[in-house]
Image: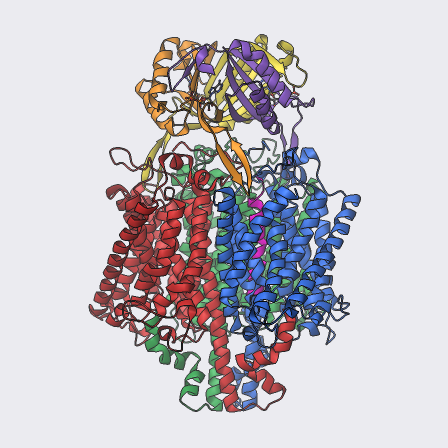
Chain colours: A orange, B yellow, C purple, D green, E red, F blue
Amino acid sequence: MKLIIAYIKPEKLNDVKQELFKAEIFKMSVTNALGCGQQKGYRESYRGAVSEVNLLKKVRLEIAVNAEFVDSTVDAIIRGAHTGSIGDGKIFVLDLGNCIRIRTRENGTSAIG
Amino acid sequence: MKLIIAYIKPEKLNDVKQELFKAEIFKMSVTNALGCGQQKGYRESYRGAVSEVNLLKKVRLEIAVNAEFVDSTVDAIIRGAHTGSIGDGKIFVLDLGNCIRIRTRENGTSAIG
Amino acid sequence: MKLIIAYIKPEKLNDVKQELFKAEIFKMSVTNALGCGQQKGYRESYRGAVSEVNLLKKVRLEIAVNAEFVDSTVDAIIRGAHTGSIGDGKIFVLDLGNCIRIRTRENGTSAIG
Amino acid sequence: MLKYIVISVSLILLTLGYSSLLLLAGDVPTIESNAKAIADGGVNLDTVWVLIAAVLVMFMQPGFALLEAGFTRAKNSCNILMKNLMDFSLGSIIYWIMGFGVMFGAGNLFFGTSGFFLNDTGSTFDSLSWSTVPLECKYLFQLVFCATAATIVSGAMAERTKFISYLIYSVIISAIIYPVSGHWIWGGGWLAEIGMWDFAGSTVVHSVGGWLALTGAIILGPRLGKYAPDGTPKPIPGHSMPLAALGVFILWFGWFGFNPGSTMGAITDIAHIAVTTNIAAAAAAISAMITAWILFKKPDASMSFNGVVAGLVAITCPCAFVSIGSALLIGLVAGILVVLSVVFIDRVLHIDDPVGAISAHGVCGAWGTFSLGLFAQDIFSPGTTGDGLFFGGGLKLLGAQALGIISVFAWCMITGFILFFVIKKLVGLRVTKQEELRGLDIDEHGMEAYADFQIFTTQ
Amino acid sequence: MLKYIVISVSLILLTLGYSSLLLLAGDVPTIESNAKAIADGGVNLDTVWVLIAAVLVMFMQPGFALLEAGFTRAKNSCNILMKNLMDFSLGSIIYWIMGFGVMFGAGNLFFGTSGFFLNDTGSTFDSLSWSTVPLECKYLFQLVFCATAATIVSGAMAERTKFISYLIYSVIISAIIYPVSGHWIWGGGWLAEIGMWDFAGSTVVHSVGGWLALTGAIILGPRLGKYAPDGTPKPIPGHSMPLAALGVFILWFGWFGFNPGSTMGAITDIAHIAVTTNIAAAAAAISAMITAWILFKKPDASMSFNGVVAGLVAITCPCAFVSIGSALLIGLVAGILVVLSVVFIDRVLHIDDPVGAISAHGVCGAWGTFSLGLFAQDIFSPGTTGDGLFFGGGLKLLGAQALGIISVFAWCMITGFILFFVIKKLVGLRVTKQEELRGLDIDEHGMEAYADFQIFTTQ
Amino acid sequence: MLKYIVISVSLILLTLGYSSLLLLAGDVPTIESNAKAIADGGVNLDTVWVLIAAVLVMFMQPGFALLEAGFTRAKNSCNILMKNLMDFSLGSIIYWIMGFGVMFGAGNLFFGTSGFFLNDTGSTFDSLSWSTVPLECKYLFQLVFCATAATIVSGAMAERTKFISYLIYSVIISAIIYPVSGHWIWGGGWLAEIGMWDFAGSTVVHSVGGWLALTGAIILGPRLGKYAPDGTPKPIPGHSMPLAALGVFILWFGWFGFNPGSTMGAITDIAHIAVTTNIAAAAAAISAMITAWILFKKPDASMSFNGVVAGLVAITCPCAFVSIGSALLIGLVAGILVVLSVVFIDRVLHIDDPVGAISAHGVCGAWGTFSLGLFAQDIFSPGTTGDGLFFGGGLKLLGAQALGIISVFAWCMITGFILFFVIKKLVGLRVTKQEELRGLDIDEHGMEAYADFQIFTTQ
Ligand SMILES: Nc1ncnc2c1ncn2[C@@H]1O[C@H](COP(=O)(O)OP(=O)(O)O)[C@@H](O)[C@H]1O
Ligand SMILES: Nc1ncnc2c1ncn2[C@@H]1O[C@H](COP(=O)(O)OP(=O)(O)O)[C@@H](O)[C@H]1O
Ligand SMILES: Nc1ncnc2c1ncn2[C@@H]1O[C@H](COP(=O)(O)OP(=O)(O)O)[C@@H](O)[C@H]1O
């Protein structure tokens, strides 16, 4: 089992969700995040005092999948989030030791889906 | 050391916290998340335009524990979060390579608690 | 590759960012979190009803780095976040299986930076 | 707009108060024409004043809406706003059709039986003939009072009441419950006969709202999670103190229409009334803050906001009949009372009133009405209330006031329980547990109040 | 402050209405001096009333600002607030320089050609001579009407219009577009000649704003993500229903200046006008809610808010000429109409109007103007409109109203398209895609509206 | 309510202005009775006007509260709201007990020594005898001015001042500091003697607030994180521009009571005053926006909001004495000045004023007072200020104005420093570092302003 973490542009969330659904990935968790990467930030000024904003709004996806789904999940995310411009985001893949469904106490690969 | 990630229903946060405290787990981190799973969403309409909301409000817990505490932690979460209905949530367990306490620079298993 | 997760005091975010920049770590992701640890919470009362608030505001950093950067990253975080008082926070280090840059589909160690 | 008046200007001038202008232009003024013009000018001025006062009171609607929205959770904001909007909208129509007639129309000592649809057959509205303003102006001014009473209830029943049930309640209070007890005191009914006084409606308006809120909150039961299994009250903090504060300031502002406007004429007394009103609110804000500070160790903002309302409610009855110093004392007591009452209702009675409506309007309305019996001084409005107990007037006035308080309390408790019980049986009063958890906005209105924000719903 | 009047008090008293006071003090009053004092007192009262009414209407500016801000996304809030602030600020100056002269100054049947900078050479402002108040009072009252028309457009063009382009638009509407059609109806122009009536501006003010909003929204195109590739409208929820609700209540409050104040004098008719205004708003709120309930299965709050505005807009033209019952009907229809119109414009025409301005102001303004031809009754303002179709007056009035509606529609569509087209060519009308995604606040103003909050920008 | 008047109606009518009504009903009117009735009607009208104006000014309290709350961080919102509520509440009582007497009571050239508790022994309030309204009306109108001065300070000292210390400050300013300098100019004191004019209080009210804010901000020191170690100012963005914008619009609205109401009588001059007030605000909003646009490359919303306030503050002194064109210029300058002043105070002086109170009220108050010496024209209020420098009146008026500005500045700086120094020594002025980081809401009031939202506290 793997845990996939992806940072994408907020406005791409819907597209990514569609692609994931098409790839039959229906489970995921989403949080808001601020990201710092190659993408340049912008200057904000308030009452004449200036600050460089380099933490840009991103959406963070967390998706636990069985190992055989990793590639299709990653592909789906890329299909949905890719624009080719800086700031498109990153995907991280981690090993997932166990997964437990609270409702049924099932665990392991059958609990993921 | 293990890192436990749990998604639960927001209104269960207090119960889960109580159960964790009873199980002598006092340290945790909480974030808001939106989750998509077996639980059906709902329809929202605004000025006549309809959307399916399938990202439901969830609370995400992150708890780092020494290996011997994993089971009791998982049990405590289940005790607090279980209602038996769809949407109760998931628990993920990952291997944790290291843990460092910023205040003292201690690391490893002694830094976790 | 490693995934570093750090919980720090919110007001220390800027200092930590500076230190990371100095250590030439330019990429990171930030989320808001609530944390429960050794730091004592406070009592809030609203219209006479009292509650103990023990979830305190924290900032969560997620930084993916190549293995050789782990130490310098951890050091930088500690330099920025350390005050010596309770509540300074924790750093967790996980193994990172893979990393993919959405824009270019590069993966592995070259995608991290 | 313009042409209308270009044509009709002479007509209007002739009939509505500027006869003098025309006269100057052509006819020769006489003593009689002058006297007529003066009287007409007086009516115009009265109309302007009462209309402006009515508009200020109307503006109390968003005051209540914001206060209630601010004191409740973000997930129920659309719902509470809609309730406040709809009780005023429904009330405007129902009170025109029926409520105004029941309250002020000729009838018996218990209710009016004529004057529906503002239909005036000459002596129908004798109970209001002391004011010179047009009937429609009287209706508007009284309507906004009715709407105030109606809207108070939504706060105490917030976060768990079904929307449709609230609409039904709203119609009944504007059509019957409020007008009937209003008739007793202001429409020439039996309490007026007995010598009870309520200048601008501590009892007529606020206690009625407060006591109905009490019955509603009792029948509904507390919000999920409000009381621990052992009965300890848990805080369910309101989601926006700035909105609540703005609501309170708007109420304070609107009350300068509520109390001084109740003269229903432009007389210089309005200055005294405005000053007593203001100082009572100020005093109550301070005393509520101090009481909260002593009880909870911190100056709770929400309690100070309630304090303002409590002071305003209390001074509403006596504002025209008491000195500035007395007003200050009445306010001070109201501020203490409202905090103690909120705590008592919450901790001892375990009745869940999210915004403190029962305490601020019910309890402090009663206190204000009672206080007149203590602090009234004949000099302020010679030949009306007479002196109160503290100024040598004995117990007569106090007795009448007490009787009024009790009768209205009984009327509201009985009709309130019947009303909410019937609604409960017919359509249900409370949303389901799932709806309450997710928030009424999504389930009752299909939308969210703060779509771009992340809202906590851990309680 | 004080000394000024200590010195000049007698002067003022002599010239401005308290001659009687002085007379009492020394001179012997005469019939003539009394008649003069009465007339002066009347002017003072008129001035007080019209000034207060103007101030209430001015307060509609934050009403619109909040409604529009609440109905749009948090990332564009500074921008919409600035647009609302600036159209009023620019309008105040431009309307003084030029707009007021074009609208009310002596000229021809199509526009005024004199009276710039309030320069009055005696008969310049004959079109407003029916009101006794000082010229500056007339200017202020008319200015706030102009600003209302101007500000309507910002809502329909929200979340994608360049700030600088909006400022240019703002100047042109206050200087030319609004004053010209206003002249036709209120400034002694050709529509007034023909017998069209618009008491407080359903057409003069609201339709003008609404139709310009229509042209703007068409030329701009919809917001990114508003329509799926197949044309299905997607919801883009507004970010704050409490702010929107407060905005609506403020508008309702301000409308008590808008309509009753359009008498431009303190006459008792203001009571009737206030009541018709209020009941139409109430009825429309209810009927909009019910219509939405039927169509979408839930009582959408935002539609009820639009309902209030729709009812107010509709009654603005006929408020002085129809009965309370007719006002209720006019409101009911407006509430239904606004919901249907919003849905039609969104689903069928695919024109993106984030706040419903076209429906509420354009469509319901037209309906209100038309309704006068149906519901007018001579008795309310004898010698003005005459009776409408439903009261036996035939089609004459209805025809004039229809002509007025169509002419103003045509005028606004033509000038609107030209104006926005020219702006588009000269400076561009729409922000870039990247700016729209990130929000206009950051890119146009360099700041955020809610710095301490986390805002979703997933759409 | 009703019965009171049913009984006393004839009494009231007789004494308060409708003698004519009674006369018509029975007695035969005479020239004298008419003259009396006219005078009484005039007093009634004056009372209505001044009361409404006072109520509008009272509503400026939430205007300031929202502006200050919006310009500061969410974690300190309860605190700033409570400060605004409490300074008005405490002020209402203290000004009744003492402040009004010190300011307007008979005394010497420096302060009043009588008239405490509104105790009037006949000639106590001769300094206000030029207005016909009842004493309580005068008190209320002056009270809301005092509260305005008091509340200005909370903004500049926001986010770091101890609550209890603020309450103490509040009492002292309402009891002594404001009334004393007020006495100099409005209470028959030495500056009035010298020929200084301040129609509605640019100096009396606003500069006093601004300069006290200056002393407070200096003694307190900047907020944590406001200045980098090298002195570079860092932005600490306000948490809600919509609340701030609403606050500004409310202030603009309320200012129509502030300036026109300062006639303290219903005269037609109020129209001119309202127009100069409005155009100055509009011009300043625009010039502040442009100045910010040039300096920061973007039209900063918060600066435009400050611009409105700056324009209003500046025109407050000269509003009755200058032409519309002059008012526009005065506003234009104020808008530029406020932006430059904010930047100067922040970047050069390193004084941390979160809301720009020192610049908007102190600096622009001084500018407005000074501008009268330049732009005054005798024709607007014959026999008062005379002509200013630009209209051939020479330096006399300008000199008096300058002296007034400087004296009041000195008075406020001295008393302000003493006051805040004493408070600092006695109870402390500033919260601890930990409290400041966590927010004053939690530590001072034990609650949060936005319980359902996630608030950033990274600065
Ligand atoms: N090494 C990293 N650790 C944590 N988050 C990262 C890392 N690299 C990128 N991110 C996240 O991904 C987002 C996009 O990164 P960026 O470098 O701008 O994308 P791209 O590589 O497509 O140009 C960042 O804003 C950040 O949230
Ligand atoms: N595979 C997964 N990856 C990431 N998050 C998941 C996954 N499965 C479930 N979740 C999270 O857990 C929540 C509950 O899942 P759900 O399937 O509704 O629960 P249950 O299994 O109890 O019916 C989801 O809303 C989502 O946030
Ligand atoms: N075992 C853990 N699991 C998850 N989060 C933790 C754990 N321990 C600490 N944290 C996070 O780190 C924060 C700081 O912890 P705390 O014990 O107060 O710090 P310190 O060790 O410096 O006193 C907590 O608020 C929490 O968010």
Residue at left 30%, top 46%?
Answer: E425
Q: Which quarter of the figure has residue F91?
A: bottom right
Which quadrant is the N terminus of chain D positioned in?
A: bottom left
Residue F54 counted in the magenta span: yes
Which secondary structure dominates the residues rendered in magenta? helix
Q: Residue at x 52, y 21 (%)?
A: C26
Q: Is residue F248 left or right of residue E322?
A: right
Which one is nearer the viewer's eye here, E444 or D377? E444
Q: Is residue E36 above or below residue E175?
A: below
Magenta-tinted stretch: F52-73
Q: Position of residue A14 (x, y in %)?
A: 36, 28
Relative height, residue C4 to residue E42 (above, below): above
Residue F149 in magenta stretch: no
Say whether residue F71 is visible.
yes
- Between D374 and B50, which is closer to the camera in this rendering? B50
- Location of residue A28 (image quadrant): top left
| x then y, percent, for residue E200 | 36, 65
